Image (cartoon, helix red, strand yellow):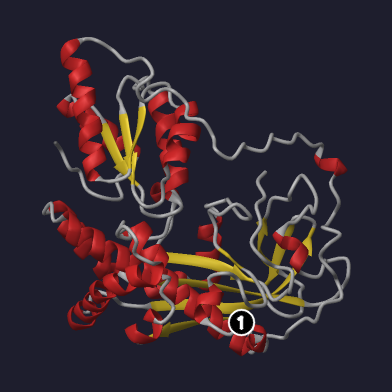
Amino acid sequence: MHNIGIKIGINEMIEKVKEVGADALGMSGLLVKSTIIMRDNLLELNEQGLSDIPVLLGGAALTRSYVEQDLRKIYDGRVLYGKDAFEGLSTLDKLMDIKKSGVDDPDFGRKVGERRIPRREKVEVDPSTLPARSPEVETDNTVFTPPFLGSKVVKGIGIDEIAEYINETALYRNQWQYRPNAGETDEDFKSRIRPILRQQLSDAKASGVLVPQLVYGYFPVNADGDDLVVYTDDTRATEQTRFHYPRQKVAPFMCISDFFRSVESGEPDYAAFHIVTMGQPVSEKAAELFAANKYQDYLELHGIGVEMAEALAEYWHHRIRTEWGFVEEDGPTIAGLFRQQYRGGRYSWGYPACPDLEDNARVAELLEAGRIGIEVSEETGWQYQPEQTTSAIICHHPKSKYFVARD
């Protein structure tokens, strides 16, 4: 068994596989963006003629259906899912039995699983037939004027303030992989796990391993078809950057650019952007725990880092709605925020409405994210460093809710 660490590129994995003559390659994905990376890694193994290597996949971001239905279709070799370390070891034992006995099971790791919910057929549409904007998105909504234009750095936010916005379900089930006991209600389950969360937060405050900070700002924008143009100032004379978003190929034909006044309208509009991070120390400490084979400690610290970054994004989204003047449209509880009970959507790159991870670099440049130590490049797969970092565009349009759209 060779543990080569976290945030390792596929070429480095391939070098190690060749060096040690590995019987299998295991990868774990704890962030949603990992699903994209896993797919690309499998395609690279195909490209390099290494699909004879069985690949074991697991982690909070991956599901059995995604691995056994989607990823098996693109990999020329065996792809196997492990919901936890125990299943992973059992799967590895079976692979070794096949290798030692020479008796193959041709379906093992190759048979595509049955989809419980049928996949919608891919719709092939001539782009020229799509509407210029969704007919369901009104253009007479109130345009809220932001409190300032440009960007600001924010540091020194209290851990307890952020922790109020933690999504316990995502943390306990997805990151930490705990499950309710037989007959245990969801609230009983969460009550049982909360002491671990309290201890993690207490330890984090004592050690300083979490360093929350962010950069955010408001910018003048207009829609140009499926693009969002960001201007340098409110004269709208100079384009600073632009983002392209995919449009749904079926009704209601939504696209993020629809939530803003068009260039042709001549009307001003605005968007907010933010990048939030838990800082480099938590990534470094998590890497130390992983390298020391302290996997439970690693899982808990890494999970708290990831979900505290998400909580900070939720917390600052609330702050932006407050500053921007429409927070009174929020639902009555923080839990409701996880179900979008607020005005205005928050879209992070890598998700179906804005899948292009290269835009992470545009956001970082727009907000001058280097001021808080954020880096992003093609070498990192356009993912932010430190790892526990996320960005978003925030809209004020009342119809801006989550939806799925891909080019």
| Quarter containing the N terminus | top left
Residue, far left: 292
State the image quarter where residue 22 is shown. Answer: top left
Q: Mark 1: few, some, or many residues within 10 Å (few <14, many ≥20)?
A: some
State the image quarter where residue 401 is shown. Answer: bottom right
Residue 40 drawn at (x, y percent): 45, 37
In front here: 223 or 30? 30
Q: Is residue 369 above or below residue 96?
A: below
Give the residue at x 86% y 59%. Answer: 135
Q: Is residue 28 above or below residue 351?
A: above
Q: Is residue 207 left or right of residue 197?
A: left
Residue 336 visible within the image? yes
Residue 346 drawn at (x, y percent): 59, 69
Q: Is residue 344 left or right of residue 351?
A: right
Residue 161 drawn at (x, y percent): 39, 86
Q: Which residue is mark 1?
A: 331
Count of numbered labels shown in the rendering:
1
In front here: 371 or 237? 371
Q: Is residue 397 above or below residue 322?
A: above
Q: Is residue 386 left or right of residue 37?
A: left
State the image quarter where residue 212 is shown. Answer: bottom left
| Quarter containing the C terminus | top right
Give the residue at x 62% y 83%. Answer: 330
Residue, far top: 102
Residue 373 visible within the image? no
- Where disc 1 sits, the SS reads loop
Give the residue at x 78% y 46%. Answer: 250
Type of the residue with mark 1: Gly
Residue 258 drawn at (x, y percent): 77, 63
